[in-house]
Amino acid sequence: MRAIKGVLLTCDAAVKQILLIMNEQQSFIIEDLDDHHLVIKADEEYRIRRQLETELEKNTYTLES
Amino acid sequence: MPSVEENPLESLENVKTHALLPFLHQQSATALSRLYTSPSSCLSIFRLLTPVERQIVMNILWLESAIPLSTMAAWVTIDGKKLYERSLETLSQLHILSQYPMKLLLNSTFKSSLRHAITGGGTTGSFGVPATKDPKHSPPTVESLDGYALERWETILHYMVSSGTGQLPTKPSTGVLYLLKESGLMSGSQNFEPQITSEGFQFLLHSPHDQLWELLLQYLHMVERRSMDLVEVISFLLMLSTMELGREYSTENLSQTQKVMLEDLRDYGLIWQRRPSSKRFSPTRLATTLTSSSEGSSLSTLAPTQATGLGNSSSNALTRSKGTGAGIGGGAAGGGAGSGNQQGFIILETNYRVYAYTDNPLQTAVLNLFVSLKYRFPNLVVGSITRESVKKALNNGISSEQIISYLLTHAHPQMRKFNPMIPVTVQDQIRLWELEKNRLKSDSGFLYTSFQSQADYEYVLNYAKELGVVLWENNAKRCFFAHEEGHGNIKSFIERRRTAGQGQ
Amino acid sequence: MMDTLCVVIDLSVKHWQRSATASDQPLSLPAFLIQLVAFLNAYSAGSSDNALAVFAAFPGKSLMLYSSTDTQPQSTTVSGPNSYPPFQLLDDAVVSSIIHHLESLSDSEQEAPCPLVGALTKALCFINRLTLDHNTNTSNAEGLDPIALPDPRVLILSVSPDITSSYIPIMNSIFSAQKLKVTIDACQLSGPDSVFLQQAAHLTGGSYLYLERRDALLQHLTMTFLPSPSVRGAIAVPTQDKVDFRAACFCHKNIVDIGFVCSVCLSIFCQPVPVCSTCRTKFPMKTLQRLNASRPPAQPRPAPIGTNGVSKANGSSYGTPA
């Protein structure tokens, strides 16, 4: 039996796909559990959140100019 | 209230418990009994009760001996049973009912004090001793008291809202700063300027009445630590709430503790004194409305900060707040030019535009928390609710519900014609923006995997489930994820099992 | 939660004297006023938003004694440290003006009947005014249905017997009250049961109480009339099990057991008439004869209480004019 320290991410399927792609550039996923759950390295969480946010931000449009 | 007809008790059931009552629940029976010796305290506490609780108290107030529960229960309707029992429970927690659940009898101290409050008489002097006429100065006018209270209260709020923005508004007194830090509304150590916390941001969006009580409750907690006499502090606050606005009271009959409080309450704007050493004091509207009801339509009746609607043009604000004091009739008196503002000042359109008819810097600053402001005119601020502005608010710890409820309570009378008042698109979008922020949820912990047998796996999993720390599990893969908190226990559980297994 | 209560007090000198000297449980006016004031204070204690107005029906005139919503003159009498200033103000206003007005009555004026219905109408006007204010304040005035005040009600405390000539104005007040969604509560403190007040309470969903235990006045007032209509949903109040539905005829203002109702305008008469005095409808001779023939020979006698709907039932059997 093994116990692996990490952070469980719960997210929707779309976010998970983005995370998988991000993982290809720089690996941080410890275990891909299912469609909505991932375990990642604990110290990577902050970076991942930042990167995800910029990624998601690319997909929002505002009327502000 | 269109819903009243569907469920006649709905309006009774939705009555909010006043913030002070849970605090009183925690006090000992002896402390409460001491508090109940004062008729003004009893009257004020009576006011804070729900309508059904008040009726129960009144029904047995004039009886000399205890009555069996069944006597009153016979009058309770089937629909009202739950409400009635909950009310009895509350009254007994407050030690207002003394023999519940055996019989119905009012606490004898409470009974005689409330009787005194209602019929007058007694010698407790608990409604404050009016000061003798001052030959040199005439007592302060209601207008000047309102102005004073307003200025004090807004100083506090404005200080909170502009912390961290680089502006330097007037600093409230050290006592107030200490209280703000203690209550967790602001953070910061000695060397740094205090910063508003996410609780602080939420606080700003509450109704003035709630804000005031939130601070006062914090004050009560602090009083315990300063080893002041809590009962005297509470009874003084409640006494203030029964005093007459615009009258001067003498400080001579106050206890030492209460004299110390004068200074604190001056800082919060609850009382006014000509000089700190003065032998007389006047309660302001903030104090005299402490036990007025706080919900719904009556919101405008007690909110000096509300009345600041167009705060700085003080003459305007004052005529308005004068009108608000007396409830509906007062509203009629101020019903002319000012009436719109006491109700609210925000117009929100379906295109997310916000028009706020205000020139009050505090209200502008509060709006700035979640609106991106565009133009400013002498009596109007225009802005719009955008994804960025809402995200900024969310990051500050303000929830979408708080934004919506702020918009609701401060909606301009023009908006009140619509049903729902706030355009649905805008409401939904604000909520969606909040959801968007929560697309990724994370919990740190441990992934338990590579179990040797299904039995092993189930055994450990069941233990973890008992601890309530399992966040995710998969039988097929024989692994589960548990929260960090449980790791120590699970680890030792497995080790114990292993050593036990080796022992065999 | 805001309540509105208007109290209408019957101050007929003659009937209070009778009540004070009654052999069975006398209740004098001063004793009544002490308990009334306690009741009014208990009501005001509930919430500072509670609106209260007190109206009095003196012999020959009706007056408003107190209103919590009108700006009070800054109280000249300084209330002491032992009483709550608003209560003091209320008590002074009510008691002193009652004493003042009663003392200024001449002996002949004392005999005049008390216009209870006048005071009731003033109370309804007062509530109407509050409703209008309430609506302008919430900016609801522009073309929308006015929002009714939450739970407005009128409490009538009466000692006089019904004045039958005021049947029509009382019924009209009841209809206005229904329209304003005002609940009318009534308490007959002494004398005979009041037919009109029973109907007023019944038709507006209020409570009518005939005070039998005059020594427990305050307790009865508190239990029955203190709770607002919404609280009565949880803690019920005594209601009538029987309502005296008899009406007064339009021709002689007598309370009738059997009335004759005009089939066109529903006016009530104590005997068959050839022409309706209200709408001028002429009835056929034949019908009149038939009705006269079927009338009970006995002259009007005191009717037993609880003859529910007798007048209505008989009225509807009245044939339509051919």
Image (cartoon, coloured by chain):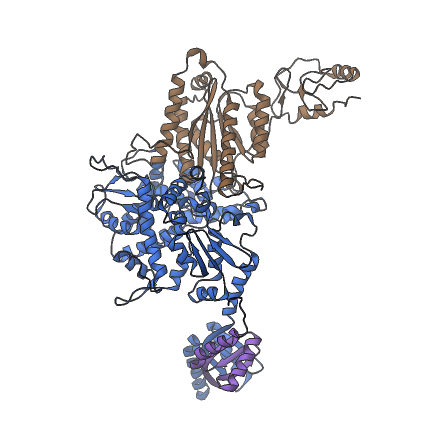
Chain colours: A purple, B blue, C brown
In the image, taking residue A14 as reference, residue B325 lies left or right, namely left
In the image, taking residue B378 as reference, residue B284 lies left or right, namely left
Identify the residue at image location x=54%, y=71%: A60
Is any atom of residue C130 visible in this view?
A: yes
Quarter of the image for residue B424 reads: bottom right
Marker count (numbered): 0
In the image, taking residue C15 as reference, residue B149 lies left or right, namely left
- Quadrant occupied by the N terminus of chain B: top right
Location of residue B302 in the rendering, given as x and y in whole percent from the top left corner: 40, 45
Location of residue B357 in the rendering, given as x and y in whole percent from the top left corner: 45, 51
Residue sitting at the far top = C108
Q: Taking C48 as reference, is B310 above or below it?
A: below
Closest to the observer, B300 or B20: B300
In the image, taking residue B315 as reference, residue A30 lies left or right, namely right
Quarter of the image for residue C86 reads: top left
Is any atom of residue B36 visible in this view?
A: no
Location of residue A21 in the rendering, given as x and y in whole percent from the top left corner: 54, 83
Location of residue A28 in the rendering, given as x and y in whole percent from the top left corner: 48, 84
Closest to the observer, B475 or B388: B388
Q: Taking B331 as reference, is C191 above or below it?
A: above
Closest to the observer, B72 or B393: B393
Closest to the observer, C228 or B153: B153
Q: Taking B397 as reference, is B243 above or below it?
A: above
